[in-house]
Image (cartoon, rainbow, N blue to C red):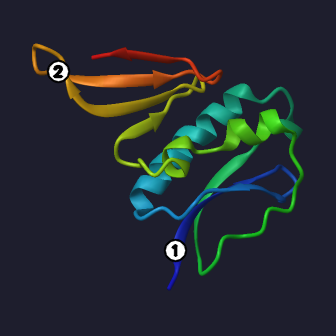
Amino acid sequence: MLKIFLVFYTASGGVASVSKPIGDMEFCESIAQRRNEQNLEDAKSDADIYVAECEQHKTPPKVTVKLDAKTREHLRVNCIERGFPNQCSDLPNGDLETLTSARDKDGHRIVAITKPDGRRLYGT
C-alpha cells in the first residue's frame, strides 16, 4: 500500500528530509506550498533552497544528504512528527501553533504557541 510523504529536495536533487506518512494528499500539498514559499524567502543562496514535494511510496525515501542540526530542524514538519496534523500548524517564523481542548471563560479555544527554543505561550 502506498503512503504519502512530504519529501524535501536540495537544489542538486538530493533528499534532505522525509516526513512521517501523511494521510491526505491535499493536506500534504498545502504544507508543501507553504514550506516552499518560506524556504524561498529564507534562502541566502541557490544552494540553500529546499523544495518540498508530496510523493507516494511504499516505504519512506532514503535521506541522501547530510544536514547540520539547525537545517534539519528547520525542515522538520512538527505537526506530522508530533502526530497532530489536524490540530496544529507550522508557522513561517518557526513557531508551532497547537489547538488545545481547553476553552477560556468566553468559550474560545485556547491555542499553544511553541517557540523554536521550547518556550510555550498560550492565548485564544
Query: Tags 2 and 1 in contact by the CB under 8 Å rule?
Result: no
Closest to the observer, 45 or 121: 121
The correct choice, above or below, for 96 with respect to 105 in the image is: below
Identify the image quadrant of residue 77: top right
Q: Which of marks 2 and 1 is in front?
A: 2
> Residue 108 — which label?
2
Identify the image quadrant of residue 102: top left
Q: Where is residue 80 in the image (x, y as percent from the top left)?
A: 51, 51
Left-right relation of 3 to 49: left
Quadrant for the C terminus, please: top left
Q: What residue type is labelled 2?
A: His
Closest to the observer, 2 or 107: 107
For label 2, the SS is loop
The correct choice, above or below, for 91 with respect to 65 in the image is: above
Query: Residue lying furthest left in this view?
Result: 106
Residue drawn at the location 65% of the way across and 44% of the way down? 76
Identify the image quadrant of residue 122: top left
The correct choice, above or below, for 65 with respect to 21 in the image is: above
The correct choice, above or below, for 21 with respect to 81 in the image is: below
Residue drawn at the location 46% of the way across and 52% of the way down? 83
> Residue 3 — which label?
1
> Residue 33 — which label?
none
Question: Mark 2 or mark 1, which has the lower sequence index?
Answer: 1
Circle 1: is it few (<14), some (14-19), or many (20+) Cα within 10 Å? some
